[in-house]
Each structure stands twice: as structure tokens, then as C-alpha cells.
Amino acid sequence: MPHVPVGLRITPGSVNPKDQGEKMDQDMMRKLVIGSAVEINGRKTLACARAFEIHRRHDVPLRDIGRICDENDIRICACQLGCFQ
């Protein structure tokens, strides 16, 4: 089961901004990305597949996910394109 940050739990019947035709604000995006990162060997990481899942499910632009990762020292891992180890 994917990790979802506290305060942003998506459960059956809950409201997803994408379903309402609304865009997620910057703070919600930041919380979602940071909350989805896991710590491995003392380093925060976000799997590439999870980044794409956030993009698809919540309509968060990939560019914003990358920016948030950069700003918060979160490393992309398990890259589907082979760009990151």
C-alpha cells in the first residue's frame, strides 16, 4: 500500500481535488510529495513510479514534483528511464 501523508488520506468517498476539477495548491502538492518520500539509509527518496502515480492521481505536474524534490533534498530512485539509480 503506498504511503500517503497525514492529512491527505485518500479513502473511498473522500474528495480528491482532481475529481472536483480543481487544481491542488502548492502547499498541498508539497505535503503530498514530501509525505510520499521514504527514508532509506538516512536519505529521503521518492521512487520514480510513485512520482508518476502522484502525477496521474492528483494531476500534479511532473515539473512541480521534481522542483519539490530538489527543494527538499529528496532523491528520485528506481527511475523508469534509467536516469537515476
Image: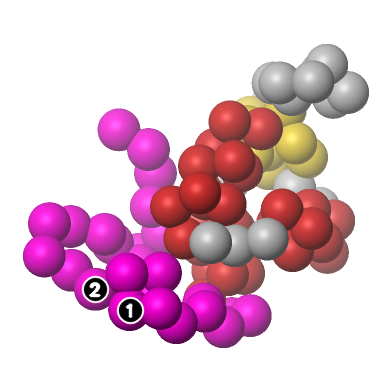
Tag 1's secondary structure?
A: loop
Q: Residues within 10 Å of mark 2 (few under 14, many from 20)?
A: few
What colour scheme does the image use? secondary structure
Sequence-first tag of 2 and 1: 2
The residue wearing badge 1 is 20
Determine whether, in the image, residue 27 is placed left or right of residue 19.
right
Q: Position of residue 17 (x, y in %)?
A: 38, 75
Label 2, secondary structure: give it: loop
Amino acid type, label 1:
Gln
Mark 2–mark 1 CB contact (< 8 Å): yes
Range of the magenta residues?
A: 1-27
Residue 24 in percent (x, y) is at 51, 77
Identity of the residue drawn at 47% across and 60% down:
58
Q: Residue at x 12, y 57 (%)?
A: 12
Q: Residue 40 in magenta?
A: no
- Above or below 11: residue 82: above
Q: Which mark is residue 67?
A: none
Q: Is residue 6 magenta?
A: yes
Q: Is 30 positioned to the left or the right of 18 in the image? A: right
Mark 2 — residue? 15
Q: Quadrant of residue 38?
A: top right
